[in-house]
Amino acid sequence: MSQLERIKVMFGAAPQKPRIVKPEVKQVHSLKRMTKADFEALKQHAHDHQLVTHKWRNRRWAVLILANLLFTLSFWLDIQMLEGALTASRFVGFHLIDLNSALQVMLAHKHIIVNLFIGTATVFVLWAVLGGRSFCSWVCPYHLLAEWFEWLHLKLVSKKLVSDHEFHRGTRTVFWIVFALLAALSGYTVFETISPTGILSRALIYGPSLALGWVLLLLVFEVVYSRRAWCRYVCPIGLTYGMVGAISPVRVKYQLDKCFHEGDCRRVCLVPHVLDVVIKGRAADLSTPIGPDCTRCGLCVDVCPSGALVFEVKGLSKLL
Amino acid sequence: MNDQNTEEQAADAARVSPAAAVQGAVSKRARAPVRQQANRRKFIRSTVMIGGVLGLAMLGYIPVASARKSRLRPPGALEESDFLSSCIKCGQCVQVCPVAAIKLDDIDQGFGIGVPYIDARQQACDFSCDAVQCILACPTGSLTYRKPAAVETRPGMLLAQPPVLKAKENDPEPTLNLKERIGVARLARPEACLAVQGKGFSGQARGADFRGRLRYVAVDRWKPVRVREHPYQRDLCDLCVTECPIKEAIRMDESQAADGSKRYRPQVLEQCVGCGVCEMICPVAPAAIVVDHREPWRA
């Protein structure tokens, strides 16, 4: 799958089977087949010796909580480290402006001052380096809440009390376009009104608000009706950062030769379509970077028993 | 995930009808309608969700369009529609204000969610920061010293003279670096005004529970203190005049009544910036003097 195809998948297209598969890939597949008994034994061995770890999840939760705590403490203790909220802030004086909020304001107001531009450019470079949607899983407070409620959802699903209703992933692209148009045409930052990211961030810093009711409603919807619905099918912030992540060197890498094709990674993933490549016969190459819609949360890296999914920094791995 | 679900549904359908199960096992054609149905459901579900979320988001227009609460915006704010569109809802203005005069609106204000405002009666802007810190903090230019040419400005917003801060009066540069008003004070209930009644005032201006702060230069120029910690003793109530942070923005007019007795009345002057300190400090409830948001000064 080319990067262009991976971007298409991010916008909502269904992942396609590869047209051209490299001979070495065919070789790996046939090797896995030829030594079926050995392959099964290897699988068993990997599972027996699997280190059940939440390394990346724990690191990520720590970073997410610390980042949001820094906002709160900066204001409460007046230490002026990270002033503002997630929509726009100042880190020891440097402007940081959320890309989607900046886009909304620029389209609605149609006048860009220098500080707005500097803050937006800084954040663009920052997340282009750090992985784009890594904003979602490593910073966004709604992501963490939704992750906890997802656990409840899965619990209820396993007891057959609720089921996951999927939506078309293209809806998020529709939302992105419509919210951009609404901002430009109405002159109001319409999306900010319902953005749980902004609402939660402000509530954490400036105290509780009525708007938290809307966030709770979203969480209930996700528990009883559709798994991670906001992040998967609605949030234009995710798509904005996904686009930035398309050029990012930080990503998860899939190694075909180590994979047992059991699909544990797809079951824990927020965006399982990016892991389509782990399905038997979908990989076109021995090593495949996971697409830009990946939030770099590392749940798949943690869950994989054989280390077929790892974090990589493009270019850096070759250097080291 | 998609395939999984669709297949499950196909399997469910197959279980219902054994004939379909046989067919389903041998030909793909029999499964097609089930998959189509599932896809159609998903499409309808997705369309309904798009409509629902957008509908809810657009509800935010109602408070904006209808006769919603008029807000006193922080100093340097653009006109209301420009203000709502340019504000990025980050609250940096809230964080820098030394008297915590700035609050953020909630979702009941629709598109105004997260936008700053001042409730002058609870805590007015007394320019304790001297430099109008909220303007310096604003990253998007929603609050600015000078309005860009592209945005409209209302008549009567600009002051004739740069306002002189009483606290800075002896500084080399005594003026406030903002030459516009956010509103204008008005003696809304002269019948309630203690000065109009010829009465004095003694005690805590707003009672023992009031949390508002004010800068008293005589106490500490850089540290505003709570109003309740600064009781007054006046033979004629003139708190709105003496506590006004701007020079020559309000004065006590004295006149002779027909019976020869003196009559008093606070008079708002052209230099009033609409900061709301008079509204906050007014000891009668509700306040006799209030700030009209975004209004021009009238003689």
Image (spheres, rainbow, N blue to C red):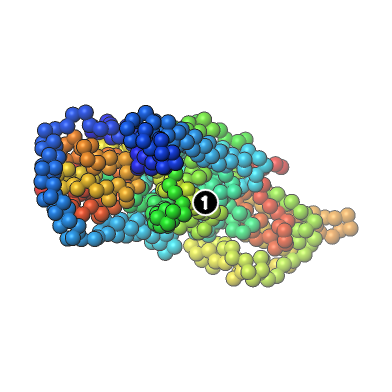
A230 above or below A208?
Answer: above
Viewer can see residue A188: no
Q: Does residue B277 appear to the left or right of B87 in the view shown?
A: right
Determine the residue positioned at 41% across, 35% down. Answer: B19
| Type of amino acid at the residue the image marks with label 1 | Leu
Q: Nearer the viewer, residue A177 or A219?
A: A219
Residue A18: % across, % down = 22, 31
Determine the residue positioned at 76% across, 61% down. Answer: B194
Q: Which quadrant of the view contains residue B38?
A: top left
A283 above or below A71?
Answer: above
Determine the residue positioned at 36% across, 59% down. Answer: A65
Q: Give the number of callouts.
A: 1
Residue B152: % across, % down = 56, 33
| Location of the N terminus of chain B (image quadrant) | top left
Q: Which of A17 and B169 is in front in this view?
A: A17
Q: Is mark 1 on a helix, strand or loop?
A: helix
Q: Nearer the viewer, residue A112 or B32?
A: B32
Q: Which quadrant of the view contains residue B52?
A: top right
Q: Which quadrant of the view contains residue B122?
A: bottom right
Which residue corresponds to mark 1? Answer: A217
B197 above or below A32?
Answer: below
| Location of the C terminus of chain B (image quadrant) | top right
Residue B30: % across, % down = 39, 31
Viewer can see residue A269: yes
Q: Nearer the viewer, residue A137 or B212?
A: A137
Please report, as a chain letter, where disc 1 is located: A
* Label 1, residues with CA under 10 Å away: few <14, some 14-19, many ≥20: few
Determine the residue positioned at 38% across, 60% down. Answer: A69
Residue A269: % across, % down = 32, 48
